[in-house]
Image: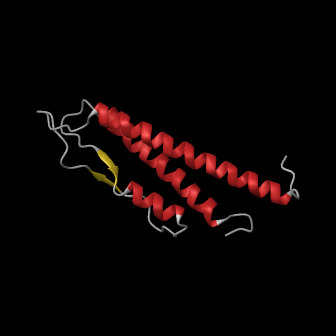
Amino acid sequence: MSMIETPLMRGLARALDLSAFRHQLIASNLANIDTPGYRTRDLRTFAGEIEQAMAGEQLSHAPAAYTMRGLLERPDGNNVSVERESLLMAENQLRFQVAAQFLKAEFHRLSTAINGGSAS
């Protein structure tokens, strides 16, 4: 840990990484909407991963993607839903934006402390 890296900053950076990974999974699901037999993939426990990251816990593993079960399938075996994926994409985007804003505020706070109370 560097002198200016705080546990909050590490947690927020991990939250941004998880959101970026989840974005890739959702985009892949949408790209495969017409692929027969394709199964929706997502992070195993996105909320749990975010909570651990924000608590400053060290996560040594890469985020785990898994195939979603129990979703309604079409006759071709594909279970991707445009509505579900669009909702997840919007939710994920919001989480990313919130984490980015908190990280920006943390950098601003550090900048203010370094500059003796006057942020530039």
Q: Is residue 101 left or right of residue 16?
A: right
Quadrant for residue 84, please give it.
top left
Q: How many marks?
A: 0
x 25%, y 37%: residue: 80
State the scheme by which the image is colored.
Answer: secondary structure
Residue 94 spot, x, y in % from top left: 50, 41
Closer-to-camera residue (87/69): 87
Q: State whether residue 45 is above or below residue 22.
A: below
Residue furthest to the left: 75
Residue 56 spot, x, y in % from top left: 55, 67
Q: Is residue 71 left or right of residue 7?
A: left
Residue furthest to the front: 117
Residue 75 spot, x, y in % from top left: 11, 33
Quadrant for residue 73, please give it.
top left
x 43%, y 41%: residue: 91
x 40%, y 60%: residue: 48
Q: Is residue 21 left or right of residue 82?
A: right
Residue 40 spot, x, y in % from top left: 27, 43
Closer-to-camera residue (64/111): 111
Quadrant assignment for the N terminus: bottom right
x 86%, y 56%: residue: 117
